[in-house]
Image (spheres, helix red, strand yellow):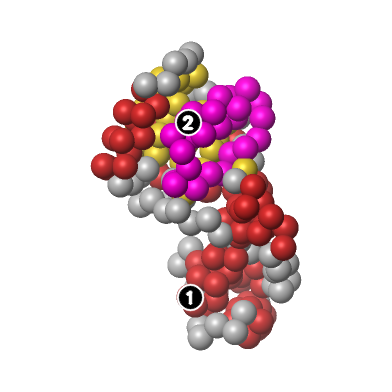
Amino acid sequence: MIRVLLAEDMLMLRRALISLLELEPGIEVVAETGNGDDVLPLALEHRPDVAVLDIDMPGIDGIEAAALLHLKLPECRTAILTTLGRPGNLRRALAAHASGFLLKDTEPARLAAAIREVAAGGKVVDPELALSALQAEESPLGPRESDALRLAAQGADAPEIARTLCLSPGTVRNYLTSAVTKLNARNRMDAVRIAREAGWL
């Protein structure tokens, strides 16, 4: 029996997915949540074989949750199920050790097959999305610009970022300004949005 944790913030969709998966032989949904912060505690409690995670949820997003699961409970494999089918999200998911990446308009039978494949140690990625990801641009940001922007995305100001990265506040401001310029963004938060959508953060 494949034990599944399902994280999806839209209650109606979550319940529909649970109903569909419960009809599949050999698959049992052992835990569900609509909040990314609950994924790791529930996984540690229920020990699922596969966590099916939406990206866009309250709390941490599904990709961050996948990375945490890989770190804290590596035997639980993860599959991302999302409407946010951008190549950058696929790259982020693969970097977080997700084994599956599927769009929410996937046929139910395809989802069940993907869960079985992921549970067996395989990888399942939407083919059109994989092709788009291969054709997508590389990040124009340097490592320090990415680090500074990532910390800014978490709400840190320049002095806090400077302390974390062991840099001067002036240098941090230069990196942030450079990131904004390279991304043709209006400001830091717009730069964060652009970089996240492209999968560069």
Upstream in the sequence, badge 2 or badge 1? 2
Under circle 2, the secondary element is: helix
User: Would you name the residue on which mark 2 appears?
Assistant: 109
**Which marked residue is nearer to the observer: mark 2 or mark 1?**
2
Amino acid on which disc 2 is placed = Ala
Residue 50, x across and y down, in percent: 51, 28
Q: How many numbered circles are shown? A: 2
Read off the residue under disc 1. Answer: 189
In this rendering, is residue 146 above or below 178? above
For badge 1, the amino acid type reads Met
**Relative height, residue 48 to residue 81 (above, below):** above
In the rendered image, the residue lying farthest to the left is 12
In the image, residue 111 lies in the stretch drawn in magenta? yes
Picture coordinates of residue 128, whole percent (x, y)? 62, 52
Residue 86 sits in quarter: bottom right
Q: Nearer the viewer, residue 55 or 106?
A: 106
Q: Are marks 2 and 1 in contact (CB under 8 Å)?
A: no
Q: CA distance from mark 2 to mark 1?
A: 40 Å
On screen, 50 above or below 162?
above
* In this rendering, position of residue 140 left or right of residue 34: right
Q: Residues within 10 Å of mark 1 (few under 14, many from 20)?
A: some
Q: Residue 46 placed where, x, y %?
A: 42, 22
